[in-house]
Image (tube, grey):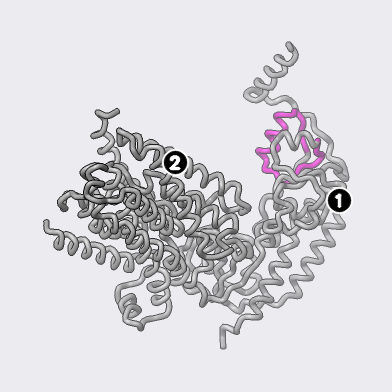
């Protein structure tokens, strides 16, 4: 009882006063209990890690609308990412957690967990770098090199079919994806001009149906789930006023996170663009 | 003011509101381009914006406003309670709950009629519940309290349904259903709402004479040959069908039915039936003007209609509550 009270007191002190000296867990050459705390880290962890290296993935990893590795994620433990879940798993590597969360875990447990932050990748170069970084941390650097080489080769073999068309990546409720994003990188690579750049909009802005029609994009890129879901937010993308604008549909699972699916998204985008009539004729 | 003059003025106001609704929007289109489009010419962009975006929106604003204004007038007349209206009595939120269940659990995909039907049904249940709980209460506040309880429960039901729905974005939509919006509606929405509203308006106008008789009390009305049960049934069905069909496409918009009868009543002979039609036309004008307002107020994303109508309606609501204070 007294010990418990003392412990509680120490914890209380620890949270406001000087933190205890964390006892580092030495990063092993090949971590065996890797916990991922976000969907985007899952996209890299699943193809790079051995199956038994993964202790847990984010709860959305198996959602086929959001995750490109939904099928491979089957059988893995899924967590919401609360501190107690993570501590109970005794991870030897935490991926996809911002620094403040790993700090909080360290303060709570008095142990420093090896962690790799993997912030959202907004360009292909960042995806490549993150693959290399994570592959090394998992003890499979060669696997990383091979994956990057495959992706490089696939992208190099693609012909940009955009031909300078102006495209709008238009999401439910009229959100428009702007420059400096992964979607913008995809568009640029496919030879498209992002309408958000023409209109001077930030990375995420809102454009009403009237505004998008007045801005006259040559092509609309919409997310696959907004075609499948019938709700108020998605209904706006089915508005008859948009029927004259050619439409390209990409699974959100390929574009929401930077990962190997970037190549799938680029291939699908180019294939769908190739099927559209030539803008110059 | 003579009735003909009042109706002419209100009709003119509603026409102006409708025209203003066609002229305002987030895309800058000058009057020349719009006029050309209106006359059948003009560029395809202007035509699309005018006929496929602004016209359905203006029509819905007028129709839904008329329905809400008329419902308020009819409910206030029938219940002899100045605070009665579909939103205060919980019918709007309940209809929105029905629409939410139909949309987010895939029922609306079965048949297009499921969406308005479920909204009407839940609206009817809510109204029936309020009437049952407090329809004959001595104090007018009892009715309002029952309405607030039902409205709150339906609002909580909307949140719960959206959080449980198998749709990752559903939670974001709670606002739209609780505050109402006419943004980005199409003729498909007009086709859902308009028939329901037409039936609702017809049923409520039918009750006009009976409402006047009811001003003499239930016994007096019966002595005048009014069938009270049928009157009540028409009222309940009229409000539920009209408001249900409206809410199914716009979400719950509060306070229009509350404000409008109070605005037009001083210009009439104050008999319940005399307030009905002017309330419908004034409601059409008010809601459409509020909808022009949400487009003119610069906000990063468009304001919800319920925000504007609440700012207009709550002061009137409070003024009446304070007047009733002696009954507390």
Q: Badge 1: how crowded within 10 Å, few (<14), some, or many (20+)? A: some
Instruction: Tell me the magenta residue range.
Output: A90-113
Tell me the residue that label 1 is attached to: A51
Look at the image and say whether residue B123 sits in the magenta stretch. no
- From the viewer's perspective, tell me whether residue A39 is left or right of residue B223: right
Specify the quadrant of the image occupied by residue B287: bottom left
Q: What is the residue that sits farthest to the left in this orientation?
A: B1
Q: Which residue is mark 2?
A: B150
Give the x, y percent position of residue A218.
54, 76
Residue A97 located within the stretch drawn in magenta: yes
Towards the viewer: B142 or A234: B142
On screen, A174 above or below A100? below
Q: Residue at x 70, y 53 (%)?
A: A40
Q: Position of residue A154 (x, y in %)?
A: 77, 71
Badges 2 and 1, same chain: no
Residue found farthest to the bottom: A281
Q: Is residue A220 left or right of residue B63?
A: right
Q: Which mark is residue A59?
A: none
């Amino acid at each position: 009882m007294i010990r418990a009270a003392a412990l509680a007191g120490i914890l209380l002190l620890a949270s406001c006063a000087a933190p205890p000296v964390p006892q580092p867990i030495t990063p092993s050459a090949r971590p065996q209990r890797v916990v991922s705390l976000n969907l985007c880290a899952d996209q890299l962890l699943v193809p790079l890690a051995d199956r038994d290296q993964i202790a847990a993935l984010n709860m959305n990893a198996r959602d086929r609308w959001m995750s490109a590795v939904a099928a491979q994620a089957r059988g893995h433990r899924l967590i919401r990412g609360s501190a107690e879940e993570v501590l109970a798993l005794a991870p030897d590597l935490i991926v996809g957690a911002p620094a403040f969360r790993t700090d909080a875990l360290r303060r709570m447990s008095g142990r420093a967990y090896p962690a790799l932050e993997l912030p959202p990748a907004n360009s292909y170069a960042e995806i490549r770098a993150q693959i290399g970084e994570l592959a090394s941390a998992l003890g499979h650097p060669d696997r990383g090199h091979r994956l990057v080489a495959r992706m490089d080769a696939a992208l190099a073999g693609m012909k940009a079919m955009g031909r300078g068309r102006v495209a709008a990546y238009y999401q439910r409720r009229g959100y428009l994806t702007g420059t400096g994003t992964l979607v913008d990188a995809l568009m640029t690579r496919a030879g498209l001009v992002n309408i958000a750049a023409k209109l001077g909009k930030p990375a995420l802005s809102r454009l009403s149906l009237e505004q998008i029609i007045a801005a006259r994009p040559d092509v609309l890129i919409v997310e696959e789930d907004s075609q499948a879901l019938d709700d108020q937010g998605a209904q706006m993308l089915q508005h008859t006023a948009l029927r004259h604008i050619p439409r390209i549909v990409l699974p959100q699972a390929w574009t929401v996170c930077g990962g190997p699916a970037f190549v799938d998204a680029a291939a699908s985008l180019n294939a769908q663009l190739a099927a559209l009539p030539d803008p110059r004729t | 003011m003579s009735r003909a003059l009042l109706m002419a003025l209100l009709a003119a106001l509603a026409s102006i509101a409708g025209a203003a609704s066609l002229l305002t929007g987030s895309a800058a289109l000058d009057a020349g381009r719009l006029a050309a489009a209106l006359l059948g010419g003009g560029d395809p962009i202007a035509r699309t914006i005018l006929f496929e975006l602004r016209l359905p929106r203006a029509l819905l604003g007028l129709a839904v406003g008329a329905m809400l204004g008329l419902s308020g007038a009819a409910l206030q007349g029938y219940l002899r309670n100045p605070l009665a209206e579909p939103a205060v009595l919980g019918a709007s939120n309940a209809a929105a709950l029905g629409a939410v269940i139909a949309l987010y659990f895939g029922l609306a995909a079965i048949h297009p009629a499921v969406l308005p039907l479920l909204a009407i049904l839940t609206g009817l249940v809510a109204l029936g519940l309020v009437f049952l709980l407090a329809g004959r209460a001595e104090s007018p506040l009892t009715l309002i309290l029952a309405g607030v309880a039902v409205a709150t429960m339906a609002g909580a039901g909307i949140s719960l349904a959206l959080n449980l729905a198998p749709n990752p974005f559903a939670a974001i939509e709670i606002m739209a259903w609780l505050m109402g919006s006419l943004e980005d509606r199409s003729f498909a929405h007009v086709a859902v709402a308009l028939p329901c509203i037409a039936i609702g308006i017809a049923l409520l106008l039918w009750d006009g004479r009976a409402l006047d008789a009811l001003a003499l009390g239930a016994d007096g009305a019966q002595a005048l040959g009014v069938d009270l049960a049928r009157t009540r049934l028409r009222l309940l069905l009229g409000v539920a069908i009209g408001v249900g069909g409206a809410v199914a496409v716009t979400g719950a918009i509060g306070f229009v039915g509350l404000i409008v009868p109070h605005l037009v009543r001083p210009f009439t002979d104050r008999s319940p039936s005399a307030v009905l039609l002017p309330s419908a036309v004034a409601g059409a004008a008010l809601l459409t003007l509020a909808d022009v307002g949400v487009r003119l107020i610069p906000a990063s994303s468009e304001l919800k209609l319920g925000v504007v109508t609440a700012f207009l309606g709550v002061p009137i609501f409070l003024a009446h509550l304070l007047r009733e204070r002696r009954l507390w």
